[in-house]
Image (cartoon, helix red, strand yellow):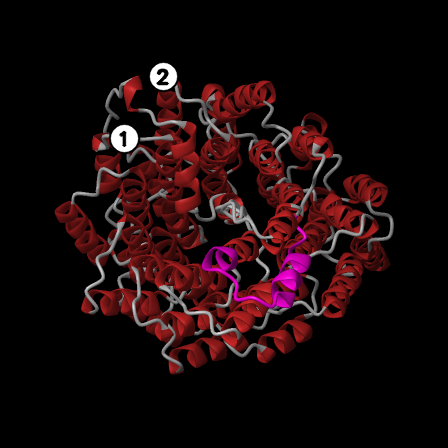
């Protein structure tokens, strides 16, 4: 249910110091792309580097060294001292090690303190634990913590936070329970670490228990505790609870709004995120650079949804772009556009709105590009179908001495595979395009191996899919076989690769291997195996997959149901196909289309027309696939007039422009009726000169009906588009051979 956020008063705002303090305590998680998780965690407590005013000459020298960031010299001065250092001196140097994340110097200081017999009071032990945690030596920090007789909440909380940051939430929770046994009372930051632990493992029940305990302690009104509670509820999918906390918070700041924006984006509630941002302005809060990142992500979600649903409403389709442009102007005025993270977010938002030139402009204006920026532009090129530009950008990265990482190669592999798909679609009867793309992919693979990057399942899956698209199924199988930890995604990728390369039998064998290993199968697995069953005509496996889908309720999903209908239709099992269709509570357009296709054979013509009309009566808006199916029905029946009527309805009633597939069916319809005069009229009106597939298809029809005049026109047009393609030559040669054979009799 839609909930309206309350009208906050300006008096609830907190000052900038508190806002920064919140950022330090609650590092927001990944909201944009790889590397963005460091947006907030990059800020750290600077700590005081002063010596607290001690008078000796050594102490003054030490303070000066720390203040000038000469940490190594400062530690050397400490180690060369012949007198026992004070706790304040040790804390000062530890704070500097903490600030600069210098584990080497921290260990030197710790070793020196142990050799000098410095007593680890609680105050000094706390800073030692904190320093080792911040420097990434969590085990050393734990040993120091365990050796201290009088432990404090400060060191315990620091250690808990360290375990959560490296994903060892079980150790963090165990530490909290031991802390309770020792009688150490948690503070507000302990609750922050504890909530983050439950957030990481998506344990809503545990998080709610902590919430209840925080209420008993009376600390839920503290901003960083409230913000952590919101973050926990958001990560656990409890949007209503997060909203309730936000709406009833007695104190809120820019971080509170940022967390709420992030939650809305992660839950796919982009409209609410924009509403939240609008209310921020109404409350008088000025957004920081991170708020821009979240709002731009919301705009990108809306733009993606508009593409997915094929909105034809101009206002709906242009709304995200208009918001991004307005934000762009606002960010320029505030000086945030020069920030690399904000600039990268704008780059991504423009590309998701289909404005690639604006994305390129933003990229070129970035002064301090990082790897995230380069990867974002790579992704933008791929998302907008500019795979060649993506590969050129990869070459530019090499010239600029930008070292790629795993995500860079995932995108480059994807670009190569997509390019092979596109080139093969334009030249369906040749493999020269696949050969060229395969050579590029092999070069990319070599680059990856030379850099000795860690090869995980994601990279291997992207690589095997690209090899498959380039026609190198053997290389794809080799990569798949080397995977030590195969997951469902990699197995599904291999299944799809087998289907694409016409090896449906191997896909079915892999399916049974997955079942033997008790792998949980998803709808993508079911759909792929059903396609394999259709290819090899295996009704037994099809029924087995159907049973598995019913057992796991996957058959309720519309895409699986549509594939089942289509598969049974291919087996001419009309009763089973119809039963699957009738079992769908609310069929969508693909389900109706599958049912129409199953009835497109000659003996099912009347039911096909009835199904198509019933779909319209049910409020299903016919799409391109549906019209292709019904035109195919007309083609099989030789119903020329009806075919033309449906084609006109497609334009006039549904606003769908016919594509190559529709005209191919229409030409076949006229060719079967021997009406080549109408075909010539259609070719004069329709702009198909740039589509080779139309002309190749027409050549085949001319060969069947012996129309040499139109065949010559089709042959010349096909050659003008692709003179090196052999298909047109073969068809034309067959036409001449048939003509010579007829003349010999």
Q: CA distance from mark 2 to mark 1?
A: 17 Å
Query: Quick check: is 372 in the magenta stretch?
Result: no
Dot 1 crowding, Cα within 10 Å, few <14, some 14–19, many 20+: some
Percent across and percent down for residue 280 are: 37, 23
Percent across and percent down for residue 367 are: 72, 35
> Is the magenta region chiefly helix, strand or loop?
helix
As drawn, the residue found furthest toward the left would be 216
Q: Quadrant of residue 349?
A: top right
Which residue does the numbered mark 2 point to in the structure image? 282
Question: For the magenta stretch, what is the residue range?
Answer: 69-91
| 255 sits to left or right of 243 | right
Percent across and percent down for residue 629 are: 47, 45
Nearer the N terminus, badge 2 or badge 1? 1
Identify which residue, 523 or 367, lies in the foreground: 367
| 146 sits to left or right of 410 | left
Identify which residue, 429 or 396, lies in the foreground: 396
What numbered label is drawn on residue 251? 1
Query: Residue 664: in sight, yes or no?
Result: yes
């Amino acid at each position: 249910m839609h909930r309206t956020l309350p009208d906050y008063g300006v008096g609830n705002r907190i000052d900038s110091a508190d806002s920064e303090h919140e950022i330090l305590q609650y590092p927001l998680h990944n909201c944009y792309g790889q590397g963005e998780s460091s947006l907030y965690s990059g800020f750290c407590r600077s700590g005081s580097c002063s010596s607290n005013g001690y008078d000796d000459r050594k102490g003054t020298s030490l303070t000066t060294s720390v203040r000038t960031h000469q940490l190594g010299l400062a530690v050397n001065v400490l180690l060369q001292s012949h007198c026992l250092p004070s706790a304040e001196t040790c804390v000062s140097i530890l704070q500097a090690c903490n600030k600069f994340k210098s584990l080497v110097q921290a260990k030197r200081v710790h070793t020196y303190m142990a050799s000098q017999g410095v007593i680890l009071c609680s105050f000094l032990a706390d800073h030692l634990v904190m320093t080792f945690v911040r420097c990434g030596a969590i085990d050393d920090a734990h040993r120091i913590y365990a050796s201290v007789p009088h432990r404090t909440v400060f060191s315990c909380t620091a250690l808990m936070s360290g375990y959560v940051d490296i994903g060892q939430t079980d150790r963090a929770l165990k530490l909290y329970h031991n802390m309770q046994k020792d009688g150490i009372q948690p503070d507000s930051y302990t609750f922050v670490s504890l909530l983050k632990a439950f957030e990481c493992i998506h344990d809503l029940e545990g998080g709610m228990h902590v919430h209840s305990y925080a209420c008993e302690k009376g600390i839920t009104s503290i901003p960083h505790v409230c913000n952590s509670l919101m973050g926990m509820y958001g990560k656990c999918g409890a949007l209503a609870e997060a909203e309730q906390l936000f709406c009833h918070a007695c104190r809120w700041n820019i971080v509170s709004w940022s967390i709420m924006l992030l939650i809305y984006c992660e839950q796919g509630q982009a409209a609410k995120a924009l509403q939240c941002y609008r209310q921020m302005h109404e409350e008088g809060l000025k957004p920081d650079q991170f708020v821009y990142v979240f709002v731009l992500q919301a705009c990108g979600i809306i733009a993606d949804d508009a593409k997915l649903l094929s909105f034809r409403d101009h206002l709906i389709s242009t709304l995200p772009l208009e918001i991004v442009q307005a934000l762009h102007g606002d960010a320029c005025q505030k000086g945030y556009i020069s920030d690399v993270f904000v600039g990268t977010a704008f780059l991504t938002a423009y590309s998701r709105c289909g404005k690639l030139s604006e994305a390129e402009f933003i990229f070129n204006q970035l002064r301090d590009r990082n790897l995230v920026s380069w990867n974002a532009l790579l992704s933008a090129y791929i998302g907008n179908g500019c795979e060649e530009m993506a590969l050129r950008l990869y070459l530019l990265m090499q010239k600029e001495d930008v070292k790629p990482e795993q995500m860079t190669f995932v995108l480059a592999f994807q670009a190569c595979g997509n390019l092979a798909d596109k080139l093969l679609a334009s030249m369906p009867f040749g493999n020269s395009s696949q050969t060229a793309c395969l050579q590029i992919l092999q070069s990319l693979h070599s680059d990856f191996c030379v850099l000795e990057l860690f090869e995980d399942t994601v990279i291997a899956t992207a690589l095997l899919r690209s090899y498959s698209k380039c026609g190198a199924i053997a290389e794809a199988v080799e990569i798949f076989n080397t995977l030590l930890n195969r997951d469902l995604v990699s197995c599904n990728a291999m299944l799809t690769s087998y289907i694409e390369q016409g090896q449906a039998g191997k896909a079915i064998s892999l399916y049974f291997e997955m079942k033997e290993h008790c792998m949980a199968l998803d709808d993508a697995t079911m759909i792929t195996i059903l396609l394999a069953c259709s290819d090899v005509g295996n009704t037994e496996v099809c029924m087995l997959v159907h049973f598995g889908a019913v057992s796991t309720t996957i058959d309720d999903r519309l895409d699986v149901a549509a594939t089942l209908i289509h598969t049974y239709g291919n087996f001419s099992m009309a009763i089973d196909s119809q039963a699957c269709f009738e079992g769908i509570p609310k069929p969508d357009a693909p389900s109706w289309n599958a049912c129409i296709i199953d009835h497109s054979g000659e003996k099912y013509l009347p039911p096909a027309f009835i199904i198509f009309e019933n779909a319209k009566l049910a409020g299903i808006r016919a799409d391109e696939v549906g019209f292709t199916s019904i035109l195919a029905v007309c083609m099989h029946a030789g119903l020329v007039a009806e075919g033309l009527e449906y084609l006109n309805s497609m334009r006039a009633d549904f606003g769908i422009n016919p594509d190559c597939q529709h005209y191919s069916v229409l030409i076949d319809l006229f060719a079967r009726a021997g009406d080549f005069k109408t075909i010539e009229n259609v070719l004069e009106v329709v702009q198909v000169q740039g589509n080779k597939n139309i002309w190749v298809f027409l050549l085949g029809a001319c060969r069947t009906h012996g129309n040499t005049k139109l065949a010559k026109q089709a042959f010349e047009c096909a050659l003008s588009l692709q003179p090196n393609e052999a298909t047109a030559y073969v068809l034309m040669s067959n036409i001449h051979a048939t003509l010579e054979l007829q003349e010999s009799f």
